[in-house]
């Protein structure tokens, strides 16, 4: 697995989340890692952003079947990148935290089923 250095920012404003418009027409939002590579951008937890209707923004995993957590995106496939509004960043981070929380809950339920308790037979 790739070595991902974890540095925790002090506030939401400091979290390096950016939006990318790809030459394919897709818009994605992702956590961006600092790298020295000039031809690629290292991203983590990319999500596709789609507007449904006039007011509804939908996020969906961009690489849902990838085993890798860190992805390298070729800069030649990007039309532009930009910082995102704080509300959008907070929404994105909440989705990621909910996923982690769900995984932890699944692990706990599996552990309880293996050990056994009065509610599971």
Image (cartoon, rainbow, N blue to C red):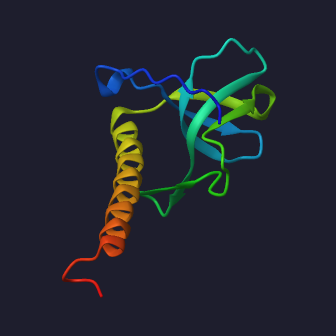
Locate the C terminus and report the quarter of the image it occupies.
Answer: bottom left
Q: In this view, does 93 lie above or below 61?
A: above
Q: Which of 18 and 55 is in front in this view?
A: 18
The single residue placed furthest to the left in the displayed view is 118
Image point 41% across, 58% down: which residue?
103
Image point 39% across, 33% down: which residue?
85
Q: Residue 56, how many percent across, how many down? A: 42, 59
Locate the N terminus and report the quarter of the image it occupies.
Answer: top right
Q: How many marks?
A: 0
Q: Which of 13 and 45 is in front in this view?
A: 45
Q: Residue 6, how many percent across, how many down? A: 46, 24
Q: Is residue 67 above or below residue 65?
A: above
Q: Is residue 65 above or below residue 85?
A: below
Residue 112 picture quarter:
bottom left
The single residue placed furthest to the front in the displayed view is 115
Q: Residue 49, how many percent across, how many down? A: 55, 50
Whether residue 114 sits left or right of residue 118 in the image: it is right
Q: Which of 3 and 34 is in front in this view?
A: 3
The single residue placed furthest to the bottom in the displayed view is 121
Image point 62% across, 56% down: which residue?
64
Residue 65 picture quarter:
bottom right
Residue 9 picture quarter:
top left
Q: Which of 111 and 76 is in front in this view?
A: 111
Q: Residue 114, how many percent across, how many down? A: 36, 72
């Amino acid at each position: 697995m790739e070595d991902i250095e974890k540095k925790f920012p002090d506030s939401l404003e400091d979290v390096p989340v950016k939006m990318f418009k790809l030459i394919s027409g897709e818009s994605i939002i992702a956590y961006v890692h600092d790298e020295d590579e000039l031809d690629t951008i290292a991203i983590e937890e990319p999500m596709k952003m789609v507007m449904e209707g006039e007011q509804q923004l939908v996020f969906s995993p961009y690489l849902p079947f990838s085993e890798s957590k860190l992805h390298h995106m070729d800069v030649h496939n990007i039309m532009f990148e930009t910082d995102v509004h704080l509300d959008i960043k907070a929404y994105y981070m909440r989705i990621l935290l909910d996923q982690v929380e769900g995984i932890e809950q699944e692990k706990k339920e599996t552990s309880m089923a293996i050990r056994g308790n009065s509610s599971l037979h």
